[in-house]
Amino acid sequence: MFGKITTVLKILSIFTHFMTKLLPFIQHQCKWPVWRMEIDELSNIIFLEVRNGADKLVSFTSIGLDNGMVNFDGLTTPERWLTGIETAFDGVFVLHNYQSEKGPAHKGLTAIDGHTGKTLWSNYNLAFDYLSVNGPVVYNTQIQPKKLFLADIKTGETVRNYQPIIDEVLNNRILSPQVLPVQAFKSLPDGVEAYGNTVDYLEHNNFRIVSLHTFLDGQLKQVLYIFDDEGDTVYHDLLQTDIQKLQPEAFVVHNNKLIYLKNRSVLIVLNLQNTVL
């Protein structure tokens, strides 16, 4: 009797262990390195700015974080290099141009439907100031002194004058890891030693996420580990290999999704919601 109960408990323990193992929900290979990611809070779409520095080409990708669907990939614009993502809101992402290749100053705005890739509007006199809970706040670069307006992101029309009380900054709900000294983190798997003085660390839904640099096979590499509340490793990945210097934070969490890049060109998304049997 007790032998059967013990066997059943062991089976349940093994089943529970494998149920907590994490697998990528989204794994999307981009053609070139990803330079920027932008998440739209309302539609829960992630937009990627993908650049080919050698040929000076830029393209854009749209992926739904709820369903994993690729809305479009490799979308290009008439400006093939001097453009990039400015912001995203309500299913639309906005691009800016650069005034010149030698400087960071922005020029003009172009809005693109995040589901279809269709250009909705362009205005080369407008500049982006910040994203509010009501939409983008913009200004006309030809008007001095600078005056702020709330813009309709679907049409580009200015809706009204900026109102600081109601046009507060939109909270993007992105959780970034904290930087901890290596000595404060004692839960690395056997044989893994951190290189450098710090690790990136975040706790979310009973998961503990850490990224760090380490030497493997004589090369400096960046790795990611996820542990459950019992300290067991439920996921790990090699983020970058043969790197020359320490890299910045490797991941973020948004709406229970862990988001990171592998080798700068593969978008990986994991669902961090608690597993309930």
Image: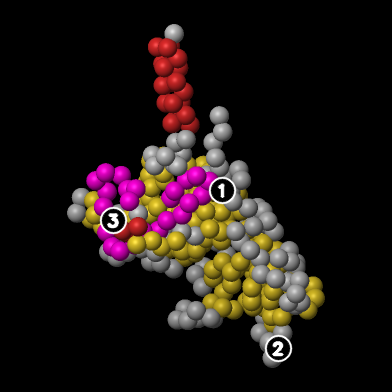
Residue at (24%, 46%) from the top-left corner? Answer: 191
Q: Which residues are magenta?
A: 186-209
Q: Front-most of 27 and 183?
A: 183
Q: How many marks?
A: 3
Q: Secondary structure at mark 3?
A: loop
Residue at (55%, 42%) from the top-left corner? Answer: 273
Tell me, for residue 256, which label it has, or none: 1
Among the two numbered marks 2 and 3 on one chain, the one whose residue lies closer to the N terminus: 2
Answer with left or right where residue 150 lies relative to residue 233.
right
266 part of magenta stretch: no
Instruction: Tell me the kind of residue under disc 3.
Output: Ala
Instruction: Tell me the kind of residue under disc 1.
Output: Asn
Nearer the camera: disc 1 or disc 2: 1
Residue at (60%, 59%) from the top-left corner? Answer: 173
Do the residues under discs 3 and 1 have CB atoms within 8 angstroms?
A: no
Neighbor class of circle 3 (other Cα within 10 Å; few <14, some 14-19, many 20+) is: some
x and y percent of residue 224 in the render? Answer: 38, 50
Give the farthest residue toward the bottom.
Answer: 144
Among the two numbered marks 3 and 1 on one chain, the one whose residue lies closer to the N terminus: 3
The residue identified by callout 3 is 194
x and y percent of residue 31 in the render? Answer: 44, 54
x and y percent of residue 120 in the render? Answer: 70, 63
Among the two numbered marks 1 and 2 on one chain, the one whose residue lies closer to the N terminus: 2
Answer with left or right where residue 221 lies relative to residue 176.
left
Give the farthest residue toward the front.
Answer: 2
Give me the C-alpha separation between circle 1 and circle 2.
43 Å
The residue identified by callout 2 is 143
Residue 69 in view (yes/no): no
Residue at (31%, 58%) from the top-left corner? Answer: 183
Give me the C-alpha separation between circle 3 and circle 1.
27 Å
Instruction: Tell me the kind of residue under disc 2.
Output: Ile
Tell me, for residue 93, which label it has, or none: none
